[in-house]
Amino acid sequence: MSHWSCTVGAHSHHFGSLRELMAKATPRRSGDELAGVAAASAEERVAAQQCLADVPLRQFLQEPLVPYEDDEITRLIVDTHDAPAFAPVEGLTVGGFRDWLLRYETDGGVLAALGPGLTPEMVAAVAKLMSNQDLILVAQKRRVVTAFRCTLGLPGRLAVRLQPNHPTDDPKGIAAAILDGLLYGCGDAVIGINPATDSVPAVETLLRMLDELIRKYEIPTQSCVLAHVTTQLQALRHGAPVDLIFQSIAGTEAANKSFGVTLALLAEAQAAALALGRGTVGRNVMYFETGQGSALSAGAHHGVDQQTLEARAYAVARRFDPLLVNTVVGFIGPEYLYDGKQIIRAGLEDHFCGKLLGLPMGVDVCYTNHAEADQDDMDTLLTLLGVAGCNYIMGVPGADDIMLGYQSTSFHDSHYLRQVLGLRPAPEFEAWLEKMRIVSDGRRLLPVGRGHALLAHGND
């Protein structure tokens, strides 16, 4: 096991393992303090960052932060590492890698070729040395394109998950929220419902309602009911119209087991969804959600900092070629990300790490009501992510999810980003919006009269 020392001012600081060094180099956050792994002072944090800058990237292949024999995620990372892809940067330190990423010559094509050679720990390490603008600049270079019934992640495009949750899964309440979102031009990422009841009959009812709507109006999008993966599999086997398979995932085997998930189960679900062949322009059938702090909340963090564990969750996602990955950045609460400053930083870190690892990253720009954050903080993060090339954001009625009880982004927030940054919906969905006379020129909302086809559906 490696040891590092660094002197800052009059004090010498010692770090007894790569795991400790990584944790203490992390920008301040309440979750690491709760876990007892954070730097004790700003001075110690700076010392750790100076030491981390000199760590060779290959050190992360030699010293797993979570033991290989104890964790299937570590085994996945090590066993699937692409050495030829890693070759262009194998001689660099973490600090040298940061400089390499910021070069003009390191463009999207170079980053795409490098991705399979990077481990989550490498990208988490370099993120700890980067400023917010560094994270934005590098993430913006990397586009990750996926497809099912529409194409997501193309340059100049921003998609929206239409999130019509209802506290009692009332079909009329959900339908009203879907109608509202579609008339705002949202829903190209997915129409995705978090069910209040994780039961097979409830999930089947919602899936059939979504499928009927999508087929009736020929909407080029995909649906998902975000129940547990085993519930979705049962519904699929009963003949329910499943487009995407959803699951929350984490960065350690033990944390995933607390969710009732293994890599084998996810592989089974992916195979079942692919066998249905419901996509029209692509075959990406998986949807994953993550969030810093989930492994700590499950007591399964192995003494590793939460930002690094979040990046390890992306190794799980990468294995299954997903359509969507979403870090629900402020959802767990102030115990893990205390205030707006920490939420903003975490959102930029997660987006950067996911993109470098080749994932189609979205971010739920969100906070809980007991966090030291407000909607102004979310507007700031939303804007920064738009500049950074985020694939999609959430569209929640009024930005207030009345079922999950947290604050997110609203349907009209997509129009803010699309106007100020010149972004458009997914191309197939944009064509449908214009055909339905909901928008013109991809971005401008049109007045909707009483005779509009979707309003007729709302009256049924």
Image: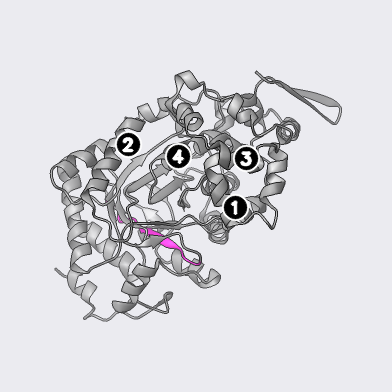
Give how far across and how far down residue 243 sits, in percent. Answer: 26, 52
Nearest to N terminus: mark 3 or mark 1: 3
Q: Label 4's element?
A: loop
Q: CA distance from mark 3 to mark 2?
A: 30 Å
The residue tagged 3 is 87
Would you call the spot at circle 4 few (<14 residues within 10 Å), some (14-19), or many (20 or more)? some
Q: Quadrant of the C terminus?
A: bottom left
Q: Nearer the viewer, mark 3 or mark 1?
A: 3
SS assignment for the magenta stretch, majority? loop
Is 164 in the magenta?
yes
Nearest to N terminus: mark 3 or mark 2: 3
The residue tagged 4 is 332
Q: At label 3, which amino acid type do we have?
A: Ala
User: Compared with residue 415, is residue 350 higher up or lower down, i.e. above or below?
Assistant: above
Q: Is residue 261 visible?
A: no
Q: Quadrant of the N terminus?
A: top right
Question: Is 188 or 55 nearer to us in this picture?
Answer: 55
Q: CA distance from mark 2 to mark 1?
A: 30 Å
Residue 232 occupies which quadrant of the picture? top left
Q: Is residue 200 visible?
A: yes
Furthest-right residue in view?
A: 10
Q: Residue 266 shows which numbered tag?
A: 2
Q: Label 1's element?
A: helix
The residue tagged 1 is 110
Q: Nearer the viewer, mark 2 or mark 4?
A: 2
Q: At label 1, which amino acid type do we have?
A: Val
Nearest to N terminus: mark 2 or mark 4: 2
The magenta segment is 156-166
